[in-house]
Image: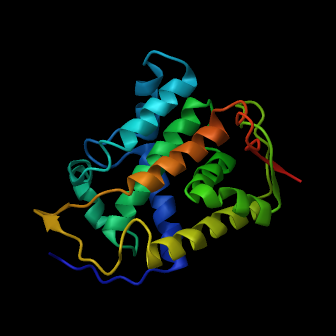
Amino acid sequence: MIKQVKTLTHDAIMNALDWSYDTAINGGIPGMDTAVELADNYLKKKGSLEEQVNSLIRWQNTKSVTSGFLTGLGGIITLPVAIPANIASVLLVQIRMVAAIAHMGGNNLKDDEVKSYVYLCLAGNGAKEIAKNTGIVIGQKLAMSGIKKIPSAVITKINQAVGFRLLTKFGEKGAINLGKAVPLVGGIIGGTVDGITTNIIGDVARKIFIEEDNKGDEPFIIEVN
């Protein structure tokens, strides 16, 4: 067992989010598909778009919650951000899933707005609260041609709010207990992703990027007041 001693800060969380997003989009972990490659694999499957997305979420909550999946992220141990490697691996897995869903919905992952929406999904059930507190309105599904450009100041507020929420989550009782040692075997990370949290995040991503409506629930999309 090797215990990583790193102070978790908001800046560290934000750096980890940006590193994870860049890695999910552009690659860099040997043997791990990018978000676009992952999405395209599921778009080839039978069924409706929503069924394809559900299949992706189910996979993320079965195979990815096993230690065997995370052992493939050995390169993450050298990540250039001041954050425990087990937390970084959780963020990478979840961001790649959400980004893949966003791509499946026809969104450009290079857009700052889409990146911010991906981060928002990581707040899970807290996404609506963050949206409300940052002055954006929950409406209908994000359409490929209907994404509203939002001011950079609002994007910054959303991202920072997500960062603070994750800081609280990981620092107290989130998916990973920082007080635990990170088990390393031959330089490879062991551990699991919180399947329940990941499933909630996947559901939020589906509502934001895929569903036309929420079947009686509050419509779920972001437009600036």
Identify the image quadrant of residue 217. top right
Q: Is residue 57 visible?
A: yes
Identify the image quadrant of residue 30. top left
Farthest residue, direction right: 225
Q: Is residue 61 above or below residue 106?
A: below
Farthest residue, direction front: 216
**Residue nearest the observer in this picture, 92 or 26:** 92
Residue 213 percent coordinates (x, y): 73, 33
Residue 114 percent coordinates (x, y): 64, 46
| x 35%, y 77%: residue | 178
Residue 11 percent coordinates (x, y): 53, 76
| x 35%, y 82%: residue | 6
Q: Where's the C terminus, which quadrant?
A: bottom right
Q: Is residue 32 above or below residue 122?
A: above
**Residue nearest the observer in this picture, 4 or 217:** 217
**Residue nearest the observer in this picture, 34 or 194:** 194
| x 66%, y 57%: residue | 127
Residue 171 percent coordinates (x, y): 45, 78
| x 23%, y 49%: residue | 72
Q: Where's the N terminus, which quadrant?
A: bottom left
Image check: 97 left or right of 157? Answer: left
Q: Is residue 22 visible?
A: no
